């Protein structure tokens, strides 16, 4: 990283703050923007962050631990119907109602504060046949809570539009998403800007090659979409 130091400026913030961050540095246009919507592996691998049920840890899941609700806050304070909606909408979990009901019962006995505790409640709440699938039964619930905690989808459309707006003509926006909910928003936003502001360069999302997945199994669900800024009206 040292060799890039003169050109590299690290800023902690939300992608919805893109325009403000650039303006604060006197930048009005850029040649490219990359959105990597995945969480970082070091965060996932740190039990203290609470993203995974693979190791015991506090039920946190905040990417920015200085602000916002934790996953434990949501699990222990959200009404049953709202909790089921979160699990269904963000996790696309078919047993969201059963899981939410089980979480309510469990938290009445004692607060759900640890990752293993949450995973155990989910495991016990789903049908036996569901436990033998490719994914652990708690995978979708953990995804849903992480998305809710970090408001990952709430501002994505606006952030993409802001990014396109600051691109120079011919500049490119690249978005790497990791689950269908993200990819759907990217696809919809790109389509809405197509022809007027953006030329879509990827008719279908680009997927990682087998060799890349073999090197990095976490890349298996990645999808890349790319667009190019069209010449602005009134510019030659």
Image (cartoon, rainbow, N blue to C red):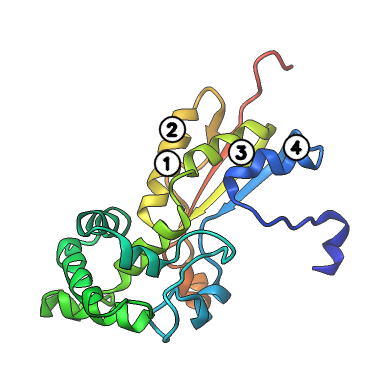
Helix, strand or loop at mark 2: helix
Query: How far apart are the alpha carbons under marks 1 and 4?
Result: 27 Å
Could you classify mark 1 by the number of other residues whose Cα lies within 10 Å: few (under 14), some (14-19), or many (20 or more)?
A: some
Pick whichever, 116 or 132, lies toward us.
Answer: 116
Say which element carries label 4.
helix
Q: Earlier in the sequence, mark 3 or mark 4?
A: 4
- Residue sitting at x 45%, y 36%: 189
Q: Does residue 87 appear to the left or right of 206 in the view shown?
A: left
Counting from the top left corner in percent of width and height, residue 66 is at 59, 64
Q: Earlier in the sequence, mark 3 or mark 2?
A: 3
Q: Are marks 1 and 4 in contact (CB under 8 Å)?
A: no
**Cα distance between the residues tagged 3 and 2:** 15 Å
Q: Earlier in the sequence, mark 3 or mark 1?
A: 3
Closest to the observer: 70 or 77? Answer: 77
Residue behind mark 1: 187
Gap between marks 3 and 1 measured at Cα: 15 Å
> What numbered label is drawn on residue 23?
4
Residue 80 spot, x, y in % from top left = 21, 60
Q: Are marks 2 and 4 in contact (CB under 8 Å)?
A: no
Q: Quadrant of residue 97?
A: bottom left
Residue indicated by mark 2: 191
Q: Name the mark on residue 163.
A: 3
């Amino acid at each position: 990283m040292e060799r890039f130091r003169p050109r590299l400026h690290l800023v902690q913030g939300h992608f919805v703050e893109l325009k403000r961050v650039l303006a604060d540095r006197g930048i009005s246009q850029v040649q490219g923007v990359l959105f990597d919507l995945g969480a970082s592996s070091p965060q996932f691998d740190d039990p203290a962050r609470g993203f995974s049920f693979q190791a015991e840890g506090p039920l946190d899941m905040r990417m920015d631990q200085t602000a916002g609700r934790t996953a434990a806050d949501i699990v222990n304070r959200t009404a049953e119907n709202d909790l089921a909606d979160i699990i269904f909408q963000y996790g696309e979990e078919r047993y969201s109602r059963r899981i939410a009901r089980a979480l309510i019962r469990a938290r009445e006995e004692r607060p759900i504060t640890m990752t293993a505790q949450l995973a155990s409640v989910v495991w016990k709440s789903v049908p036996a046949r569901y436990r033998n699938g490719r994914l652990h039964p708690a995978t979708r619930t953990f995804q849903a809570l992480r998305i809710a905690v970090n408001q990952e989808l709430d501002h994505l459309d606006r952030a993409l539009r802001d990014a396109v707006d600051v691109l120079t003509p011919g500049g490119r926006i690249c978005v790497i998403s990791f689950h269908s909910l993200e990819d759907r928003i990217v696809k919809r936003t790109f389509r809405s800007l197509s022809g007027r502001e953006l030329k879509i360069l990827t008719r279908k999302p680009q997927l990682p090659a087998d060799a890349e997945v073999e090197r990095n199994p976490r890349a298996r669900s990645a999808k890349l979409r790319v667009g190019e800024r069209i010449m602005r009206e009134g510019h030659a």
